[in-house]
Amino acid sequence: MTSLARRVAVAAAAIVSLLSVDALADKVATLHARGTAPLAERSAIRNASDGGARGLGHETVTENEVLQGEGAAGDKIGTSEGLVAIGKTTGADWVVEPYVQSSDSGTRVELKVCQVSSGRVETLARDLDPKVDSLVQMREMLALMLRPQGVGDDPLPWDAKKPVAAKPPPEVLPKPKTAPPPPPLVWGEHGRISLGVAGGLGTLAARPDNASGSTTLYFWALHGDIALPERPWLEIIGRFGGLHGPGNALGLDVGARAFLRGVGAPSIALGAGATFGVFGAFGSGIVRGTLGLEPTVSVAFTRSFQGELVVPLRVAPGEGGALFWTGAQLALLARF
């Protein structure tokens, strides 16, 4: 091959190469951005979109051409028909329309791209990363949209860049608070003083030889007890009551009693008391002194009330022979 022929071949190859590059470079018209973001932010995104198209090797139309195209679209701007009209007016192969929203959480961009030859319109949206240049992010979006096949099923590269959110640990619900069990009921814990009434049934186990009539007795009593401050198991007691059977009598007894608490349960106490007193029979003028014992079972029903089973043993010495009676008596007392 001669030198001249070689030069012609090289020149032809260069021309073909330039024509090929030019054929691959599409013309892109980037419209003015719309949306709720401030004008300055919309203008910045529009410039980034325009620069992103150039960064992909495309040619962009001038500002005057964009204005002419937008005027040709009129109120159909944003629709497929309006975008095609802009493309034909400006001679663009692609028309790009940015839509920008701004909020406290950041900036969101939606790009609408129309392929003028087919009228196909595609839309992609993303939340912009404030740490990355917006031009780079627009170029990433346009790289998928400014191609014959469009976006297709290709993965979005910005989604792949998002860190995978760590799965929160399973929620540990606090254990429901349960009320502590009430403290056990302890006999005598509420107070030192107890007042109450009692009633019972008994018998005259011994009486003077000249006595007659039934030996069955009915008795009642008013109880008053005071526990000692330093010895709550020891109480000073007082009894005022009546005896009814062969005759009627009133009596008054004072004394003391001691308890063994917590027998079988904290609310139960066993006790025994000793008394001395006096009683007088109605109509006969008989007045005698008495000595007595009181075995007792006491149970606290609540912290304020207790019940007692008392076995009174009383002896009353005197002329003609002693009187001795016993029985069973139930008492209900309030403690405070």
Image (tube, grey):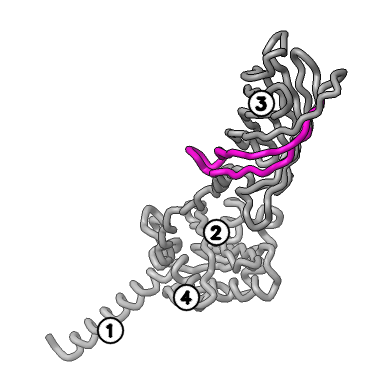
- Which quadrant would the N terminus be assigned to in this image? bottom left
Secondary structure under badge 2?
strand
3 or 1: mark nearer the eye: 3
Distance from Cα at disc 4 to Cα at disc 1: 37 Å
Can residue 2 be seen from the camera position used here?
yes
| Amino acid type, mark 1 | Ala
| Amino acid type, mark 2 | Lys
Q: Which mark is residue 112?
A: 2
Queried whether the magenta region covers residue 189, the answer comes back as no
Q: What is the magenta range?
A: 252-280
Mark 2 touches mark 4? (CB < 8 Å): no
Q: Residue at x 57, y 68 (%)?
A: 30
| Amino acid type, mark 4 | Val
Distance from Cα at disc 3 to Cα at disc 4: 98 Å
Q: Quickly name the residue at label 4.
A: 136
Mark 1 touches mark 2? (CB < 8 Å): no
278 left or right, relative to 126: right
Secondary structure under badge 4?
helix
Upstream in sequence: badge 4 or badge 1: 1
Secondary structure under badge 1?
helix
Upstream in sequence: badge 2 or badge 4: 2
Distance from Cα at disc 2 to Cα at disc 3: 98 Å
